[in-house]
Amino acid sequence: MLKVSIYRYNPDIDSAPYMQDFQLDTQGKDIMVLDVLEQLKAEDPTLVFRRSCREGVCGSDGVNINGKNGLACVTPLSECVKNNTLILRPLPGLPVIRDLVIDMAQFYAQYEKIQPYLINDTPAPAIERLQSPEDREKLDGLYECILCACCSTSCPSFWWNPEKFIGPAGLLQAYRFLADTRDTATEERLSKLDDPFSVFRCHGIQNCVAVCPKSLNPTQAIGHIRTMLLSSGT
Amino acid sequence: MAVTNVTSFGRSGLSDWLVQRVSGVVLTVYLLVIAAYLLFTPEVDYASWKELHSGLCIRLLTVFAVLSLAAHAWIGMWGVLTDYVTVRLMGPKATPLRVFLQLGMIAVIFVYVAWTVAILWGK
Ligand code: SF4
Ligand code: SF4
Ligand code: FES
């Protein structure tokens, strides 16, 4: 029997959050954390969590699994269970709506700030803006982000200043557009990042790198932004 | 993204960051120089210490190191205070407390710099 301890909080009836313990017979199978949640929800329909694709694509089921942020759907028990115990909590640092569901508004607000779309005011060509394969390659390791928030909610700098520090996810996307040769707003983008908080609250703790389920490297992207700021001399 | 940075050291996050790196290097160099002196001087006493600090080079290096320390400490402490002594973590009393702590830091840093100059060039 696997012991599963889950953070429960329903603001309508609970005065404070608490941890609820469940016992689950996994029949010795190495299932995913999301399967555990689904099976427990069959027993207790009041248990609430987000999920959609159940294959690591949509980014909706980021949770804190035995102390480490990750996607429940692609984390097998063999990778996370210690002492036959699975502890599930909501991603830290953002307000809890109910059980494992958090309010991601702050996270998206930071994403919105970096203008996550191509800006190019030259006349659009007849078909599409072409890019050489080499230039396209510069976006590898950046465009794959699924905005699961595992990184930003593991970053102490984001915990302390979520309204001022863009956080690893937003900064990875900021660099994705800075690195795009089809984008013409590089200088404007950089000038908006030059304050002491947006980028420079990153202290290179690298929690973000350690948890990203897509194996992306926000710290490296942040380093590139710093270098660009340095050479643009803003 | 316009964040009020009146209380940060420089005009931008980038300049703060640069000052932090450069002052770090200056402090490392100074520490190495002093460590080398302590290691390779057979007998360190008041006379030899005074002798060391009679040179203009070492005096300038010392002043430079203390100024670096002042900048480094200010930027670093400003970062720590704006992480932890915030309205978000402590409620409304955080702002006056942070202003108080920052004024205290300015006072301490000023005294250290002035004291250094007084020691090096005083009678
Ligand atoms: S960088 Fe990784 S951890 Fe962060 S939001 Fe994107 S996919 Fe998730
Ligand atoms: S490297 Fe920077 S962004 Fe990543 S967790 Fe650390 S402080 Fe946060
Ligand atoms: S359910 Fe879509 S990423 Fe896990």
Image: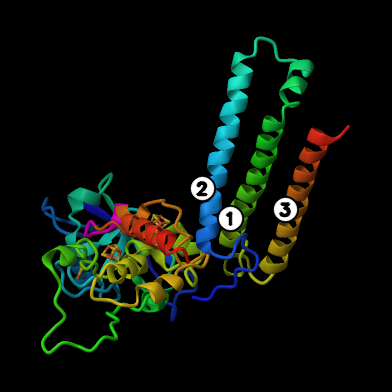
Answer with mark 2 or mark 3, whichever residue precedes in sequence: 2
The front one of A4 and A205 is A205
Between the residue at mark 1 and the residue at mark 2, the CA separation in whole angstroms equals 17 Å
Residue A127 drawn above or below residue B50: below
Q: Residue at x 89, y 32 (%)?
A: B123
Where does residue A131 sit, x and y in percent of width and height? 15, 72
Q: Are marks 2 and 3 in contact (CB under 8 Å)?
A: no
Where does residue A146 sit, x and y in percent of width and height? 24, 70
Q: Main secondary structure of the magenta part?
A: loop
The front one of A42 and A230 is A230
- Rendered-image quarter of ligand 2: bottom left
Answer with mark 1 or mark 2, whichever residue precedes in sequence: 2
The answer to which quarter of the image holds residue A55 is bottom left
**In the figure, is residue A58 to the left or right of A207?**
left
Name the residue tied to disc 1. Answer: B80
Ligand 2 is within 8 Å of the C-beta of the residue at disc 3: no
Amino acid carrying mark 2 in the image: Arg
Q: Residue at x 30, y 74 (%)?
A: A48
Please tell me whether residue A73 belongs to the stretch shown in magenta: no
**In the structure shown, which secondary structural element does the residue marked by tag 3 occupy?**
helix
Chain of the residue on which disc 3 is drawn: B
